[in-house]
Amino acid sequence: MKTLVLLIWLTPGAADLLAAPIADSDEAIRQTWDGWNAPVKPFQIIGNVYYVGVAGVSSFLIATPKGHILIDTGFEMTVPRITNNLARLGFRLQDIKILLSSHAHLDHTGGHALMKALTGAKIYISEADAILLANGGTADFSTYSTNMIAYTPAKADRLLHDSDEVEVGGSRLVCHLTPGHTKGCTTWTMAVKDGGQTRTVLFFGSTTVLDGVPLLNNPKYPTIAQDYASTFKKLKGLPCDVFLAPHGSFFGLSEKTRRLGNGSNPFIDPKGYREFIRQSEQAFEERLQLERTRERERGALGQ
């Protein structure tokens, strides 16, 4: 019986990927993917930042007169949805010049190879996640089978390091490496004009600890606990006016979309960002403490 990995968008402390044996047919798996890939109406978030993703996973367009930047392509089957969303907003697919990412998992960079082929855009990605992208997600340290996490590989055109900048048409994004969820997980910040004010938009990477991934004595990722701790420290120090993330549930996409246009912009939510990080760090610390307790218990029993 096959195990289908369900992407369920829960609280900050919950995993992005949860294994659940729900079906043994490829058709059932396809239907589940289709649900995650359901279309949503694209819209302007703030300034030149637009939501062009689907129901289950986010994609963000930074539009400039010199070409566009796209953050995350979703699954490979998400690419036609993004294409349609761009057209609905009046943008041309071929004007995408750079592809960025939050992290190199199937549901965020699965469409990178296809989008690059369609647009000729350059892929800029962290050095660690470039390795994951190049082997189509199969070198990930998660506990899930490769046939469930694999996607079409793609080659990076530029390797990014902490504090590197990516600029197109006057829009400049700053790379903040926030490893843990993947070894090269990346958070982005950029300044946008909002009327007479300048706002900091933060595109969050992820801090979810995947189900079944140990934080202690992890041979595939020995420094995972230290990396998470450093990531939380960094995230708490970053400026954020507009909180965006690779999954809509992280930043209240549905609820905020309903409120958009009725008064102040609901996506301006620095408190929401701080609370999300607080809860996520708490979940990480509880998980780490649980593993430490179990380790001490095994030691006491002489195992």
Image (cartoon, rainbow, N blue to C red):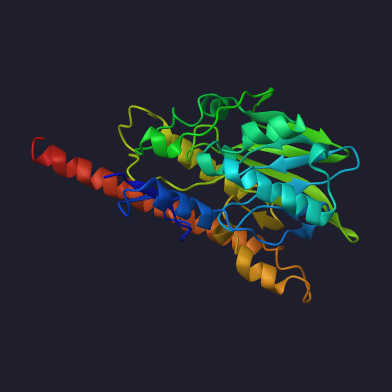
Which residue is depicted at the point 32% across and 36% down? 216
Indicate whether 147 appears above or below 35.
Answer: above
Indicate whether 26 appears above or below 221.
Answer: below
Q: Is residue 216 in view from this perspective?
A: yes
Total residue callouts: 0
Q: In front here: 128 or 114?
A: 114
Left/right placement of residue 6 relative to residue 278 reads: left
Indicate whether 281 appears above or below 212.
Answer: below
Which residue is depicted at the point 73% across and 51% down? 84
Based on the displayed image, in which of its 4 quarters is residue 160 positioned? top right
How far across and down, in percent of the image, does residue 293 sit?
23, 47
Which residue is depicted at the point 62% across and 51% down? 58
Q: In front here: 251 or 232?
A: 251
How far across and down, in percent of the image, does residue 174 sit?
72, 38
How far across and down, in percent of the image, does residue 148 sit?
41, 39
Left/right placement of residue 276 relative to residue 29 reads: right
Pick out the residue farthest to the bottom: 262
Based on the displayed image, in which of its 4 quarters is residue 169 positioned? top right
Left/right placement of residue 121 relative to residue 273 reads: right
Q: In front here: 199 or 5?
A: 5
Left/right placement of residue 297 relative to residue 122 reads: left
Which residue is depicted at the point 30% across and 32% down? 217
How far across and down, in percent of the image, does residue 1 sit?
26, 45
Q: In front here: 157 or 178?
A: 157
Question: Which quarter of the rendering shows the C terminus?
Answer: top left
Q: Is residue 164 in view from this perspective?
A: no
